[in-house]
Amino acid sequence: MAATTAPPRRQPMTKRQRREWIEGYLFASPFLIGFTVFIAFPMLYSVYLTFFDWNLLTPPSYVGLDNLVKMFADPKVNKSLYNSAFYTFIAVPIQLVISFSLAMALTQKLRFRDVYRAGFYMPIIVPLVASAVVWQRVFHPEFGILNEALGWIGIAPRKWLFEPDLAKPAFIFMSFWMIGRQMVIFIAGLGNIPDTLMEAASLDGAGSWRRLWNVVIPLMTPLIFYNMVIAIVNSFQTFVPAMIMTEGGPQDATLFAVLNIYRNGFQYFRMGYASALAWEFFLIVVGFTVAQFYISSRWVYYEESK
Amino acid sequence: MKDAQLSTRRVSRRAFLRGLGLGSMALVAADCAAPAAAPAANNGGGEAAAAPAAEPVTLDFFAWADSSDIPAWDELAKQYMEGHPNVTVKPSPSGTGNDYYTKLQTSFAGGTLPHIASFQGWEWQPYADAGLLAPIDDYIAADNFTAPFPDGVQSIEDSTRRNGKRYLIPLQNATMVMFYARKPFDDAGIPYPTDDWTFDDFLSIAQQLTSLEGETKLYGYQGSGIWPRDIHWIRATGVQEFDQLVDPKTASFDQPKIVEIVQQVVQDFVYNLKISPTPADLEGGANTINTGNAAMKYEGAWFFPQLNSPELRADNKQVEFDVVMMPKMADESRPHRGWAEGVTVPKTDLQDAAWGFAHFMGDTEGQKIYSSITGRMPNAPAVIKDFWLPTIEKRFGVTNGKAFIEAFKRSEVDVIGGVSRTQMWNEVVKPRGWDLMLNNSKTAAEVLPDVTKGVQDLLDAYWAKKA
């Protein structure tokens, strides 16, 4: 007969433990209630709304899978997802290269280094609406500084925000203005690279390029990965510039996914359809993020795990 | 740590936690208590109606928030409260454009109905269809308040009445005419246009005035680049884009007359005749009538303060201007674009009291206050003629204000119905029509059949759902 071992009996909570347990939850209750009421409930309610037609004025009416069927056939949805993907996958790699390069430059011993750092970070604290208005002026076909600068090297002025082929590249160009946060994170990471490693590499005969490629970049991969994940999520959520500068035009060239969701929800008051779009978009972004984490094990170097 | 100290701290923490817990529960209870859907209609009157007149009443006024409107609402509320000490009116300026309606609709959905709400003439209909607004016919009859609803003005009928019942109290008649800056005409030695001018006259003048050489450009006409503002040109040909302007079922942008005029106004004015700037040229407010780079522009009375006012004159920044009716075209009735804008009374317990304030705003004294501050055209012909015309002449230098009266008599709405004009524009007309023409990549003949199909699809989907 096989001997069986009874599972250890769970000790009943003492009065003091129970009181601490209750106190712990009470301390956490403001967050728990806020999260439940203002985030979790609306999110779950939007799942429910996906199956309804609701204009906010009359009670929601059940439409089954109509919203989902319509969503997959709606050319605006495909166009907006394409626009968001195009913007994200072109803008983010370039943002990372620029911010990393800037961080490298601004960790050198330069005069006024802190001024430069503050200057590059400054756009982050400018409200997005103000940035959009500023960039509208930059891209102005007749009086914009961009056309003026291009004119110095013989490039004819372009109507950046009015030509479908140029509007997205213009938005991508504009996104480089907002790389201060990535740059600061890279600067912090670069400061943590041990001098001993760099010296050891130098003693082994590694030149500056080799040290960058074989020492600095591998050690920075966790931060590159972090910045990449955040930048992709943020880029997918681009909304304010398109709303203010182009209203999604010309010819829907800057109709990004979030703008399309906003329009359906708060301009056409199709809350059920907007909920379906929001969930589709949420799943796409989560999917990309999960994929990045999965792939990261192949290229991100975590010192403590080796 | 001493026991006494520990004990004191424990008691204090308990008290804190108890308070916190009670507060949190109160928060949840308050949240649960909030109504989840718009309240059911009441059958008029209500407690306030039955209450004695002196009982204190507070009216929430969900108000349109153009910068010129805000002081007008405050002044109207102040004047009304002076005459009605028991009433407190609280105007809540709540944005403009789509932002305003987003807030308003969300407010209705949350069950916090205002007692009075601003509306443009084509936006309140879904609220009335949902039974959220009080019909005002009985109030109008009881007060004999008919001045803002003159007979025979189609735009007022269409933008204040639905399914036989009146809902909107107009506070202004929005009618658009041609504005012209005097200086370009004076410089070129061209006589100012008069109300009997024709489309050919307009084209000829615009071409003569246009001068794109040299340092400063001057365009004869500042085009709009958007369909709603090109609607006048379309309708003046004698045809319209829909089978009917209220609750349309059929779209027909591809009629030959529409194709011809849209081609001319949207594309040829800009790229062939070059009398009008491109949207890119207009970016950031450049090349406009305001900057002295355009001679004519199609606008409404709300535009006066941008060109000329005592304040601008004090700074010597005014643009001297006047107005004229839109030029004569094929349709001899000369339709002008127009609509009413005003307020509605949502169905609440205080709708009688709300009607009192709405009536005050729409009546002669209220209209004088409102139009004096905003420059907007009042709702009643007598006030327009006897008060507004002299006022705008003095304040803004407008000498031909009667053009507005003639335009108002002929005014017709853009389109009203379950598919909003905004949706038609954003989803179809702009990306598949106007953008392509304004980029000079396709002609009206190429894009308007597709626009017709796109708008028809929206209408079909709406009516199918309705059925």
Image (spheres, grey):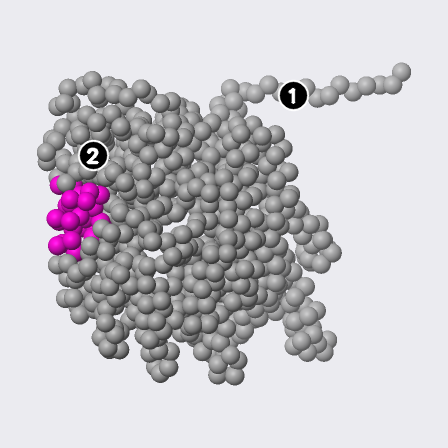
Residue at far top of view: A1
Quadrant hosting residue B93? top left
Disc 1: CA contacts within 10 A as few (<14), some (14-19) or many (>=20): few
Q: Residue at x 53, y 80 (%)?
A: A155
Above or below, A269 against A146 in this view is: above
Residue at far right of view: A1
In what element is the residue under mark 1?
A: loop
Q: Magenta residues?
A: B365-392
Residue B245 belongs to the span the image colors magenta: no
Disc 2: CA contacts within 10 A as few (<14), some (14-19) or many (>=20): few
Q: Is residue B458 visible?
A: yes
Q: Percent position (x, y) of residue B138?
A: 24, 25
Q: Percent position (x, y) of residue B303?
A: 27, 57
What residue sits right under mark 2 in the picture?
Answer: B146
What residue sits right under mark 1 in the picture?
Answer: A10
Locate the C terminus of chain A and report the quarter of the image it occupies: bottom right
Q: Percent position (x, y) of residue B467?
A: 53, 29
Q: From the viewer's perspective, is the residue at label 2 or at label 1 nearer?
A: 2
